[in-house]
């Protein structure tokens, strides 16, 4: 990756993701919140993408 910001983001992501995933996995309420948030965000993204004019 050429972009310094991108390299930093990926480095932070890989160093923090396992701990965050363990926390979510261990907490049923948090897991539900994350799951619902991801589903809503994904559905919204699909709807928005479907309405982009095709050129």
Image (tube, rainbow, N blue to C red):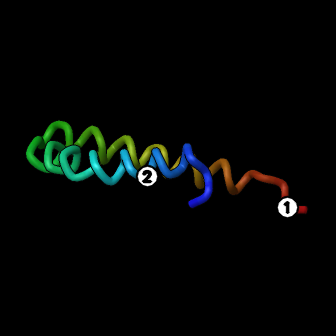
Upstream in sequence: badge 2 or badge 1: 2
Asked which quadrant contains residue 46, the reply is bottom right
Separation of disc 2 and disc 1 at Cα?
32 Å
42 on left or right of 21: right
Q: Residues within 10 Å of mark 1 (few under 14, many from 20)?
A: few
Looking at the rendered structure, the secondary structure element under dot 1 is loop
Residue 9 on image: x %, y %: 46, 46
Which residue is more in the foreground, 26 or 29?
26
Q: Are marks 2 and 1 in contact (CB under 8 Å)?
A: no
Which residue is more in the foreground, 39 or 8?
8
Residue 28 on image: x %, y %: 12, 43
Which residue is more in the foreground, 27 or 6?
6
Which residue is more in the foreground, 22 or 39?
22
20 on left or right of 47: left
State the residue at coordinates (8%, 46%): 26
Nearer mark to the viewer, of 2 and 1: 2
Furthest-left residue in view? 26
- Disc sitting over residue 45 in the figure: none
Looking at the rendered structure, the secondary structure element under dot 2 is helix
Q: Quadrant of the N terminus?
A: bottom right
State the residue at coordinates (61%, 51%): 3
Task: Return the residue at label 1.
Answer: 54
Task: Return the residue at label 2.
Answer: 10
State the residue at coordinates (34%, 43%): 36
Residue 31 on image: x %, y %: 21, 44
State the residue at coordinates (46%, 45%): 8
Q: Quadrant of the C terminus?
A: bottom right
Residue 8 against residue 14 in the figure, above or below: above
Q: Residues within 10 Å of mark 2 (few under 14, many from 20)?
A: few
Furthest-right residue in view? 55
């Amino acid at each position: 990756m050429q972009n310094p910001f991108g390299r930093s983001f990926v480095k932070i992501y890989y160093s923090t993701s396992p701990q965050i995933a363990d926390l979510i996995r261990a907490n049923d309420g948090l897991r539900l919140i994350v799951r619902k948030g991801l589903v809503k965000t994904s559905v919204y993204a699909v709807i928005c993408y479907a309405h982009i004019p095709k050129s």
